[in-house]
Amino acid sequence: MRILVFDADNSLRELLRIYLSGHGHEVLAFRDPTLCPLYAQLKAGACCCPQDAPCGDVVIIDNKMPHISGLELLKLQRRGGCKLPDANKAVMSATMTGQLEAVIAEFGCHHIKKPFQLVRIKEWVDDCMGRLILARRPVPAP
């Protein structure tokens, strides 16, 4: 699976990249959403993923990022027509409050409270993979 990780903390971003890559995933890690090649196209009002497929399978984003919050990025993705299911997006926060959890849940996304256990991240990513497999369209018989 292709996993996009956004976190300004270099050590945490690298930890997630190494851990998830070690479990066979392609991980694209960014310190700032504006550095992601997708950001400029989203900012212009269009999603850069192909019409029939999302640009990634999972997004993990810290809520406190430079230039734009994780929630603002999710709103931007939604306006841009992002094809990735909201259930396969997670927002991380070291200051997770009940109110923030509720907003994230309204988006249909997962919340991750820092500090977290890597095994919990893996379990959630595995759940995301299961959702993608179930959502796949069957190949028509010849």
Image (tube, grey):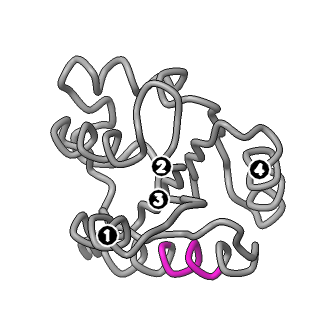
Real-space Cα separation, disc 2 to disc 3, in angstroms: 6 Å
Dot 1 or dot 4: first in sequence order is: 4
Amino acid type, residue under disc 2 in the picture? Asn
- The residue lying at 42 percent from left, 45 percent from top is 70
Q: Seen in the image, is 130 located left or right of residue 51?
A: right
- Mark 4 Cα-neighbour bin, 10 Å: few <14, some 14–19, many ≥20: few
Query: Which residue is under mark 4?
Result: 12
How would you classify the magenta stretch by its main secondary structure?
helix
Task: Give x and y (percent) for residue 35.
Answer: 54, 21
In magenta, the rendered stretch is 123-128
Residue 91 % position (x, y): 47, 59
Give percent across and percent down for residue 119. Answer: 74, 80
Tag 1: amino acid: Gln
Q: Which residue is mark 2?
A: 63
Q: Nearer the viewer, residue 83 or 40?
A: 40
Tell which tag, 2 or 1, sits nearer the viewer. 1
Is there CB contact under 8 Å for labels 2 and 3?
yes
Which label belongs to residue 99?
Answer: 1
